[in-house]
């Protein structure tokens, strides 16, 4: 059972937030799709070519788009005649099937089973500056605390005063302690202090913020590796999860950030933010398909509970909901 099934927001409220958060993506995507099939009754090569263009321009990504088109071609060949009126439902089915086949399954966020037996459960959060990394940490801290867990934050992005200040503000807002050091301190030292304090205080979950610099991949790789080594002196199997935060509104740039970070460190989960303010929600489909890394959360607004566990079927159903 997912951890966040226990806090106040109901399934209906989550669905309402998801539907609202994807409005711009739906309007853009289905506007393009309607124009592509206007005046056509049968799904033929021309319609598929137009659909391919719609998917690519909706930031689904070239490779994922080609996989979807190939699946629909097979469906059309098998069923002999497929009308354009059936295209929405077929597209929905094939997108879900693709994500399922590629093990892009639902994680229900962090589950109670995930955190049980590991205390503290350590989540190292990575991502470039400006993607909503620290905000995501704050919202996760809030949701963990709402679930009755004892939470601690580590301000290991010591290269930007604003980053430390921001996570301290979030700690105060949520009511959880933050471990920090002076600006320019060794990030690994902050992580060590955070885990030492967490062990001493019987903390359940630790969230470690890290610097988001991609201009020197080797430097980033070395820094994150050092943080891991130092944390393991306190908690031998830490970190238990390395979460990469991506800004969904940047579209294809989010793909590039995912490539850079997965090359620099072992990323085990993803959070994709800022989907409510963009028409580029298709990027969730492409990233979850191409990188074979679970998308744990999607950001759909400014509220504490607007960071929602990602469920592929709910996401695709919402994307196609009320499609004409």
Image: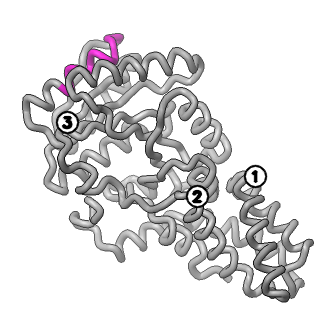
Q: Tell me the crowding category of disc 1: few under 14, some 14 to 19, or many 20 or more residues within 10 angstroms, Cα based.
A: some
Residue 289's label in the rendered image is: none
The Cα atoms of the two marked residues, 2 and 1, are separated by 16 Å
Q: Quick one: label 2 or label 1, which is nearer the N terminus?
A: 1
Can residue 237 be seen in this snapshot? yes
* Residue at the disc numbered 2: 102
Residue at figure coordinates x 47%, y 52% from the top left: 294
* Magenta-drawn segment: 184-195
Residue at figure coordinates x 35%, y 34% from the top left: 124
Residue at figure coordinates x 47%, y 38% from the top left: 267
Q: Nearer the viewer, residue 231 or 179?
A: 231
Report whether 27 appears left or right of 303. right
The Cα atoms of the two marked residues, 2 and 3, are separated by 34 Å
Question: Is the C terminus in the top left, top right, bottom left or bottom right quadrant?
Answer: bottom right
Labels 2, 3: front one: 2
Q: Nearer the viewer, residue 313 or 102?
A: 102
């Amino acid at each position: 059972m997912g951890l966040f099934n226990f806090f106040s927001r109901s399934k209906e409220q989550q669905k309402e937030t998801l539907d609202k958060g994807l409005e711009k993506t739906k309007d853009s995507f289905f506007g393009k799709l309607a124009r592509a099939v206007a005046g056509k009754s049968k799904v033929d090569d021309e319609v598929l070519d137009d659909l391919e263009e719609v998917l690519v321009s909706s930031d689904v990504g070239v490779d994922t788009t080609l996989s979807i088109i190939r699946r629909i071609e097979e469906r059309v060949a098998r069923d002999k005649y497929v009308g354009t009126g059936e295209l929405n439902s077929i597209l929905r089915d094939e997108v879900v099937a693709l994500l399922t086949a590629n093990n892009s399954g639902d994680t229900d966020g962090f589950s109670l089973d995930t955190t049980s037996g590991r205390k503290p459960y350590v989540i190292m959060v990575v991502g470039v500056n400006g993607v909503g990394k620290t905000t995501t940490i704050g919202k996760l801290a809030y949701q963990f605390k709402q679930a009755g867990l004892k939470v601690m934050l580590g301000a290991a992005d010591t290269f930007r005063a604003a980053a430390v200040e921001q996570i301290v503000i979030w700690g105060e807002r949520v009511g959880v302690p933050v471990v920090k050091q002076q600006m320019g301190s060794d990030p690994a030292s902050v992580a060590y202090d955070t885990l030492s304090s967490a062990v001493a205080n019987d903390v359940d979950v630790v969230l470690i913020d890290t610097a988001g610099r991609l201009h020197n991949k080797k430097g980033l790789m070395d820094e994150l590796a050092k943080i891991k080594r130092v944390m393991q002196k306190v908690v031998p199997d830490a970190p238990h999860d390395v979460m990469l935060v991506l800004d969904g509104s940047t579209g294809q740039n989010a793909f590039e950030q995912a490539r850079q970070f997965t090359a620099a460190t072992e990323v085990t989960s993803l959070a994709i933010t800022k989907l409510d303010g963009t028409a580029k929600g298709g990027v969730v489909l492409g990233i979850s398909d191409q990188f074979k890394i679970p998308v744990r959360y999607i950001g759909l607004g400014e509220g504490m509970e607007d960071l929602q566990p990602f469920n592929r079927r709910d996401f695709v159903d919402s994307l196609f909901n009320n499609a004409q």
